[in-house]
Image: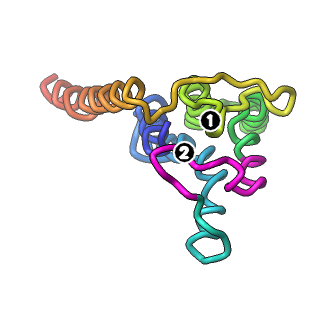
Amino acid sequence: MDIISHGLWGGVAFGRENKRSFWISFLFGIAPDFLAFAPFFASVILGFAEFPKFSTEPPVPDGIPQYVHSVYSFTHSLIIFAALFLIIWLGWRKPFWEMSAWGLHILFDIPTHSNAFFPTPFLWPFSSAHVDGIPWADHVIFIPNAALLIILYLYFFVYRKQHAEKI
């Protein structure tokens, strides 16, 4: 799934309490991809690396540095997410629910990434198991994703607000 959709899903799922909660959830929703890809894209912008060749297909994974793949495995692991969520819960003595947007990101990526480009290693470091899913850019995924996000945001931030004002 694209990074903006991940943020929007995180925000609508875990950040409806207030604006601060929304933005924290949004950031946790984009964090797995941002942490994996932002350093590489920064190095491309600064001229330290070459941008992978794109056509209508995803770039060849070998054109992306190994460190990106390593960070991607770390940030897209349900094992790592669960361990960090539990550590924070125990440390704060209460769950930090906005952080759940990170877990939701992983759950959405499992069926929406194919073997062709960054399959989601959700059981890393114990297993490299992944699902050969339908790429998120395929119209079968992309159109329903966009439609559902529009419907949810209209409901939560327009309809629900207007309905609450009438009460």
Residue 97 visible? The answer is no
Task: Report crowding for label 1: few under 14, some 14 to 19, many 20 or more residues within 10 A (C-alpha).
Answer: some
Q: Which amino acid does label 1 sit on?
A: Ala
Q: Is residue 51 left or right of residue 11?
A: right
Give the residue displayed 65% in from the left and 31% down from the top.
115
- The image quarter containing residue 126 is top right
Circles 2 and 1: CB atoms closer than 8 Å? yes
Identify the element where label 1 is drawn.
loop
Relative to the observer, which residue lies in front, 106 or 137? 137
The residue labelled by disc 1 is 116
Give the residue displayed 65% in from the left and 39% down from the top.
118
Q: What colour-coding does the image apply? A: rainbow
Q: Tell me residue 22's x, y (percent).
A: 44, 42
The residue labelled by disc 2 is 58
Q: What residue type is labelled 2?
A: Pro
Relative to the observer, which residue lies in front, 156 or 164? 156
Q: What stretch is highlighted in magenta?
A: 53-71
Relative to the observer, which residue lies in front, 14 or 107? 107
- CA gap between label 2 and label 1 equals 8 Å
- The image quarter containing residue 48 is bottom right
Q: In this view, does 150 lie to the left or right of 134?
A: left
Q: Tell me residue 149's x, y (percent).
A: 34, 31
Give the residue displayed 16% in from the left and 22% down from the top.
167
Who comes first in sequence, dot 2 or dot 1? Answer: 2
Q: Is residue 101 left or right of residue 142?
A: right
Q: Tell me residue 92's x, y (percent).
A: 72, 38
Relative to the observer, which residue lies in front, 66 or 54? 54
Q: Is residue 148 left or right of residue 49?
A: left
